[in-house]
């Protein structure tokens, strides 16, 4: 379907690829020919383990979504084969059109009141000690979905009180104060909000987002919950300069961020932002060393690092960067 036909697309229809990225401030020019060949250090395990099939069946049965599937995470095979997943609540349609992300855009359905209990039941069945709960952007909701996060946290704690809960939240589009007030009713064990890229590239990569909103969200949460680790992450390879990355890392530390992830951006399709370059493992190591020098409690910096991959080990203070070595 061509971009010219976009005017006939109803907002409620799931939009991916060309349909999703055709209406953003900086247009994505579809890449001609094959996408950039990945270097030797970019490797992912194919999702063929029987555990993957079993877990997908259970998720569909309980009408749950994972960011692993919806965002085409390259580590899906490894995580699913270990029986772990990052759950994506509030549906599989996002109200934004970030051109780096493979989650579909559209008009979301109303919140499912049974989702918190279904989520808690799945976590109990999987016998998870650590769970990451994230969401699509829900700019259609006055609180951005904060109350639904709280409902999910409470349901999980009621079912499996020993499970450690990390939440990976959106920026709540400038309504962070309202959202954090609600989240304070039942705070998580780890609070994660990704900045994704350097401020110069926000209009290109995160239309509808604001760098200062994100920093303030982390700072304000940490000021109210000093004992709860705050976490953030960046993807590299979108055209940022190393000095810009270091500046963001300093900003994060100055705003109370305790844990950091740095990984390589991988292009989901030719209609998404192109990879400007593949950052070498050596550069990731250097950036990780720089972040550690600023006093972060834990830093994971390597090409295949993703925000939720081995999140349990990172929260426990383990050095996980070596797990991503070629």
Image: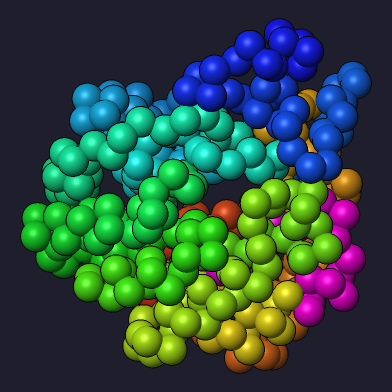
Residue found farthest to the left:
158
Taking the spot 57% from the left edge, 62% from the top edge, the residue there is: 194
Q: Write down the region rendered in magenta.
A: 232-247
Taking the spot 67% from the left edge, 22% from the top edge, the residue there is: 19
Q: Per the image, is 38 magenta?
A: no
- Colour scheme shown: rainbow
Taking the spot 63% from the left edge, 79% from the top edge, the residue there is: 252
Could you tell me residue 68's position as x and y percent? 47, 40
Q: Quarter of the image holding residue 165?
A: bottom left
Tell me the quarter of the image containing the N terminus. top right
Could you tell me residue 300's position as x and y percent? 60, 68
Residue 105 in sight here: yes
Query: Going by the image, does 147 lie left or right of 296?
Result: left
Count of numbered circles on the image: 0
**In this orientation, which residue lies closer to the viewer: 88 or 306?**
88
Taking the spot 67% from the left edge, 90% from the top edge, the residue there is: 294
**In this orientation, which residue lies closer to the viewer: 179 or 324?**
179
Q: Per the image, is 245 magenta?
A: yes
Query: Going by the image, does 149 lie left or right of 116?
Result: right
Residue 78 in sight here: no
Q: Quarter of the image holding residue 253?
A: bottom right
Could you tell me residue 108's position as x and y percent? 42, 33
Query: Going by the image, does 97 lie left or right of 221?
Result: right
Could you tell me residue 59's position as x and y percent? 28, 31
Q: Is the residue 318 above or below the residue 312 in the image?
A: below
């Amino acid at each position: 379907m061509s971009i010219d036909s976009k005017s006939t697309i109803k907002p409620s229809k799931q939009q991916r690829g060309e349909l999703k990225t055709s209406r953003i401030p900086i247009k994505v020019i579809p890449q001609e020919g094959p996408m950039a060949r990945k270097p030797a250090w970019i490797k992912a395990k194919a999702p063929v383990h029987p555990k993957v099939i079993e877990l997908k069946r259970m998720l569909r049965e309980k009408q749950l979504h994972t960011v692993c599937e919806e965002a085409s995470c390259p580590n899906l095979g490894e995580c699913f084969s270990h029986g772990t997943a990052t759950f994506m609540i509030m549906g599989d349609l996002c109200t934004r059109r970030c051109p780096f992300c493979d989650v579909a855009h559209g008009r979301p359905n109303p919140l499912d009141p049974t989702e918190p209990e279904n989520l808690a039941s799945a976590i109990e069945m999987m016998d998870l000690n650590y769970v990451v709960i994230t969401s699509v952007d829900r700019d259609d909701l006055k609180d951005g979905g904060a109350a639904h996060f709280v409902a999910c946290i409470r349901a999980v704690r009621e079912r499996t009180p020993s499970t450690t809960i990390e939440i990976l939240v959106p920026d709540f589009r400038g309504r962070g104060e309202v959202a954090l007030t609600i989240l304070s009713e039942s705070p998580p064990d780890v609070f994660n909000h990704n900045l994704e890229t350097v401020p110069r590239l926000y209009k290109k990569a995160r239309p509808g987002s604001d760098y200062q909103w994100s920093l303030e969200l982390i700072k304000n949460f940490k000021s109210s919950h000093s004992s709860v680790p705050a976490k953030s992450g960046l993807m590299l390879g979108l055209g940022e300069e190393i000095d810009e990355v270091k500046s963001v890392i300093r900003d994060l530390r100055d705003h109370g961020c305790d844990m950091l992830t740095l990984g390589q951006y991988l292009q989901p399709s030719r209609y998404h932002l192109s990879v400007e370059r593949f950052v070498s493992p050596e550069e990731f190591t250097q950036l990780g060393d720089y972040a550690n020098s600023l006093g972060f409690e834990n830093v994971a910096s390597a090409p295949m690092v993703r925000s939720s991959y081995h999140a349990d080990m990172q929260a426990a203070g383990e050095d996980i960067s070596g797990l991503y070595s070629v």
